[in-house]
Image: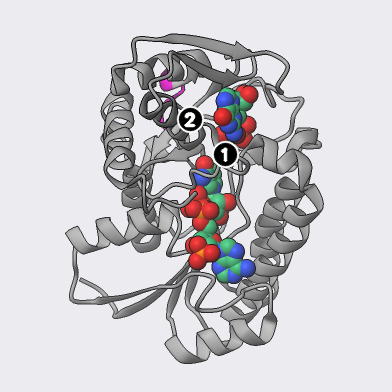
Amino acid sequence: MGEFKRILVTGGSGLVGKALQIVVQDEKRQDEDWIFVGSKDANLCDLDATRQLFDKHKPTHVIHLAAMVGGLFHNMSHNLDFLRSNLAMNSNVLQVSHEKGVKKVVSCLSTCIFPDKTTYPIDETMIHNGPPHPSNFGYSYAKRMIDVMNQAYHEQHGCLFTSVVPCNVFGPHDNYNLESSHVIPGLIRRLHDVMEAGGSTFTVLGTGKPLRQFIYSLDLARLFLWVLREYDEVAPIILSVDETAEVSIRQLTEELQKAFDFKGEIVFDTTKADGQYKKTASNAKLRKYLPDFKFTPFAVAVKESVDWYKTNSKTARN
Ligand code: NAP
Ligand code: GDP
């Protein structure tokens, strides 16, 4: 137990926010009061609305998850929107956190914002080393500016504003909209629809060759709690599964096929984009702090996510 914390979680209604709600509920502590908010509580692109939200809840700590988020295809067609919305939300949340004397802010970057042309594995020191992949430059530059602002707030005002860098996240309560989803919820939705319709062909976009590290949202939520309570550096920390856990989109597809027990044919639509071939990230910094942290095995996490969607497909976000 420590000093009392009132923790405001922006983006509390999203994939990561819902996972955090579950983990916080499981590990309830007397010295923490948690408030989860979504876009209905305040539009964080609006500075006055952000101030009103902070005046209402008076947080001592903030986990800033809110963002315009989407998969490869949504990013490719909306780079300007990703840039503008995320720059505005991040700037407002950090400014108001400073104005209201918030003691610590943990914001969220992503491994997809790293330089496109780079050496692997990528680590926390390489974020600003070159242009991001052209498919998501809007989201990437907006996210990179969080790290720049964190450093500037620390230098000028001594603030403890930090950030984490998750790899691709998946789990219950994801976004299953076929236009804007990431690959796992997109494929879960598509395969579920095929099976409901009695179809025999499951179409996956791109060649299936790109490589990704996927973290289960509940594992990420447990790591977020540790960062909030224990991690006191301004510099970012990568929250990713190990490099050996990287899988191809084809391997992911096979795992989904098993989880659904789908007996039909898988087709790769190679007319669709692959995006970044890989963005392999090192979690050595995390492992130094938490050498024994156990990630949920990928097959188990995929099965749980598929089962959740099967039960909740009528009400899931799509
Ligand atoms: P998500 O499921 O799409 O949730 C986004 C959240 O942001 C929702 O709670 C949404 O509220 C809120 N939001 C969006 N626009 C807002 C606005 N203008 N004002 C206030 N709130 C707004 O996203 P997620 O996957 O949980 O992502 C959480 C964080 O992790 C983000 O910062 C993202 O960049 C980062 N991240 C995600 C991944 C991934 O693979 N998903 C990977 C790396 C990093 P409503 O739902 O109420 O509209
Ligand atoms: P990224 O990791 O930031 O590129 O984001 P995504 O989660 O959108 O993953 C994109 C990778 O999955 C690319 O190689 C896509 O070609 C591939 N992919 C295959 N099917 C789908 C799909 O239905 N939706 C999305 N978003 N990507 C898909």
What amino acid is labelled 2 in the image? Arg
- Asked which secondary structure carries label 1, the reply is loop
**Residue matched to label 1:** 178
The quadrant in which residue 263 appears is: top left
> Under 8 Å from ligand 2: the CB of mark 2?
yes
Asked if disc 1 and disc 2 are in contact, CB closer than 8 Å, the reply is yes
Where's residue 201, x and y in %? 48, 14
Q: 293 or 17: nearer the eye? A: 17
Residue 1 in the image: above or below residue 260: below
Q: Residues within 10 Å of mark 1 (few under 14, many from 20)?
A: some
The magenta segment is: 241-245
The kind of secondary structure element at disc 2 is helix
Is 222 on the left or on the right of 36, as rendered?
left
Amino acid on which disc 1 is placed: Leu
Q: Nearer the viewer, residue 123 or 298?
A: 298
Near mark 2 (Cα within 10 A), the count class, few <14, some 14-19 or many ≥20, is some
Label 1 CB, ligand 2: below 8 Å? yes
Residue lying at 28% horizontally and 17% vertically, measured from the top left: 261
Residue 43 picture location, percent across and down: 61, 75
Predominant SS along the magenta part: helix
The residue at which mark 2 appears reads as 190
Image check: 313 left or right of 144?
left
Q: CA distance from mark 1 to mark 2?
A: 8 Å
Q: Judge whether residue 242 is colored magenta.
A: yes
Rendered position, 16 above or below 190: below
Q: Residue at x 52, y 85 (%)?
A: 54
x%, y% of residue 214? 45, 31
